[in-house]
Image (cartoon, rainbow, N blue to C red):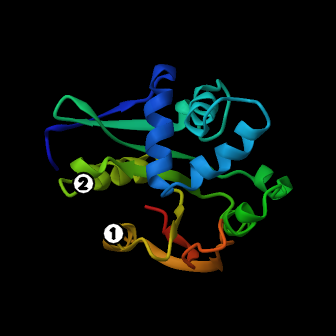
Amino acid sequence: MASFIALRQASRRDASELAILADIASRGFASWLWFADMENGVSDTPLERGRLKMSQEKAVGGWRDAVIAEAYGEVAGVAIGHALGEGIGDIEATIPATAPMLALQKAVVGSWFIGSLGVYRHLRGIGIGRRLLDDQIERADRRPVSLITASDNEAALSLYGRNGFLEAARADAVPLFENSKRHAWVLMTRSAA
């Protein structure tokens, strides 16, 4: 493992970096979701809304669930994971684009769920994603680990496949725009360690 990569628990002051990296990990899907909140007057920009969400004290998928990777003296990436509890069964999708992902998550209740794993482009290919993934597997504490990625994200599919994740299910993604590239959401799981 590359010794120049350091992991640390995120803090509330990392909320801006977390929002940017969650948006990178989702390939812009997160900021698309935050844009809807912006239109409701909650914030001035989608990334400001993301920052507010990431800074919430008790938010699932917020700063308390995040691990930051640092390399070469800068924030390089993030992994955000948590135990997926029974409560997700009670959640209904309020935005059609989130319905397929929510349905996939409901299929893996009880697993450790990695909601985001992202690395800045200029720091990819040096082991940061692998280090963050290994840390999430360790945090799972012998639970199965699950995540969702896009069917056209070949780098992510390759990383997860090389690390013991198998495709468990797929669901067609709801196009965000009329000319959106078609893809599916891929649920990948890894057996308990």
Against 81, residue 67 (above or below) is: above
- Secondary element under disc 1, as helix, strand or loop, is helix
Against 34, residue 175 (above or below) is: below
Q: Which residue is mark 2?
A: 124
Against 150, residue 7 (above or below) is: above
- Residue at the front extreme? 179
* Residue drawn at the location 33% of the way across and 73% of the way down: 158
Q: Is residue 141 visible?
A: no
Give how far across and how far down residue 29 sits, in percent.
57, 56
Task: Answer with mark 1 or mark 2, whichever residue precedes in sequence.
Answer: 2
| Mark 1: few/some/many CA within 10 Å (<14, 14-19, 20+) | few
* Residue drawn at the location 14% of the way across and 38% of the way down: 4
| Residue in front for this viewpoint, 179 or 72 | 179
| Mark 2: few/some/many CA within 10 Å (<14, 14-19, 20+) | few
Q: Are marks 1 and 2 in contact (CB under 8 Å)?
A: yes
Residue 100: name its quadrant: bottom right
Give how far across and how far down residue 115 sits, in percent.
55, 52
Give how far across and how far down residue 6 sits, in percent.
24, 35
Q: Which residue is mark 1?
A: 155
Residue 181: name its quadrant: bottom right
- Secondary element under disc 2, as helix, strand or loop, is loop
Side of 145 relative to 128 (left or right): right
Q: Is residue 19 visible?
A: yes
| Residue in front for this viewpoint, 4 or 120 | 120
Give how far across and how far down residue 123 sits, in percent.
22, 48
Could you tell me the amino acid type at mark 1? Ala
